[in-house]
Image (cartoon, rainbow, N blue to C red):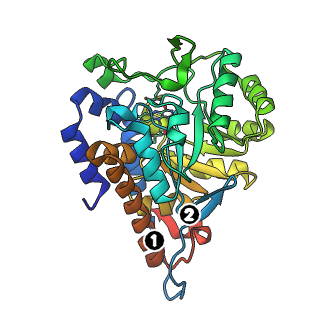
Amino acid sequence: MPTIGEYEAAARDRLAPAHYDYFAGGAGEEITLRANETAFARLALLPRVLRGAGSPRTGITLLGSSLAMPVLVAPTAFHRLADPEGERATARAAATAGTVMIVSMASTMAVEDVASAASGVTLWFQLYLQPDMDFTEAIVRRAEAAGCAALVVTVDSPARGRRDRDARNGFDDLPDGMCCENLRDGDRVRPIVMSPEVGWEHVDRLRRMTRLPIVLKGVTHPADACLALDHGVSALYVSNHGGRQLDTVPAAVDLLPAITAAVGGAVPVLVDGGIRRGTDVVKALALGASAVAVGRPVIWGLAADGERGAARVLGLLRDEIEHALALCGVASVRDLGPDLVRPC
Ligand SMILES: Cc1cc2nc3c(=O)[nH]c(=O)nc-3n(C[C@H](O)[C@H](O)[C@H](O)COP(=O)(O)O)c2cc1C
Ligand SMILES: CCCCC(=O)C(=O)O
């Protein structure tokens, strides 16, 4: 299949409708969900010519991890709804693509099992800070012991997003035989708490708890970007959660310029939301992102064709990035700048 759009169509055919809706859907009127993709269409690329740039290089280093391309696998929950091999298949696909998989705290396989699925895969671990900081610490220790190289703390979820499709479908729990394996605590599986009580002091406690780099995911306001730097985070991750939390937040790529300006190069800035093409990646990098991540595209690959489908989606993006860089007259993703992008 030549495009991510066709993987989505194939995934839709294969998935139970309620599960497709869970993966595809967003909050409220899905205004932010749609905006994430259309914002890329509203940006034009202005290529340079005769640069003699040679074959493009897509590799980057991010927080000490080496990536063959500037595209990470965003943390997404419940991969076993898409494929029986679940997050283990995704980890192998990420290893094949030479990139980082961010394992969701809400994965349907335990982080230790995901880590053992593919030799040489680089995992980062996504965390919702639990108000019970002892339990948070227990999960952090598991992620560390499993070899995760960074913690991605999702801060856009002081409450669960209101997703009308899920409400209509009555989808509010995993089927029997599946659970969030990282939430096991003795004999029970804890629910993930999304708490409005969580504040910067929890980030400070986490900072003292671990030596792993902390990436703050879900930052949209420049003032929060500045605060995050004061609290010692190692990277910022601009995201509106794929339009699944607060509806009517601006499109992810439109948030980038103000955040990168606020950060002033002090730490890397990641972004996700609506990236479906190599040209989208090039635009985000030109606007100051160090790397991007993709959520749904990997799920579509996984649901359509398991590990092979997820690997193919990532491979497609890499091919498209190389091609777009060549056509922009750019030798490496590091050479992209804002002069290459303008509004349509
Ligand atoms: C089905 C699904 C599950 C998700 N689960 C999580 C999660 O567990 N933790 C998290 O931080 N973000 C989660 N996200 C948000 C993604 O990390 C990411 O921000 C978003 O998918 C990016 O948009 P995209 O799907 O357009 O690439 C989820 C997104 C989707 C679509
Ligand atoms: C408790 C699971 C949260 C998954 C999530 O973040 C999402 O569906 O967007």
Kind of residue at badge 2 = Ala
Q: Secondary structure at mark 1?
A: helix
Q: Quadrant of residue 299?
A: top left
Foreground residue, 259 or 330?
330
Work out which quarter of the rendered image holds the C terminus and state it.
Answer: bottom left
Tell me the number on the disc at residue 322: 1
- In this picture, is 125 found above or below 185? below
Residue at image location 61% in from the left, 63% down from the top: 60
Tell me if mark 2 has few (under 14), some (14-19) or many (20+) residues whose alpha carbon lies within 10 angstroms of its own.
many
Q: Position of residue 219 (x, y in %)?
A: 61, 38
Q: Is residue 143 visible?
A: yes
Residue at image location 66% in from the left, 41% down from the top: 222
Q: Position of residue 133 (x, y in %)?
A: 70, 18
Kind of residue at badge 1 = Glu
Q: Is mark 1 within 8 Å of ligand 1?
A: no
* Sequence-first tag of 2 and 1: 2
Q: Secondary structure at mark 2?
A: helix
Q: Which residue is mark 2?
A: 286
Foreground residue, 106 or 294?
106
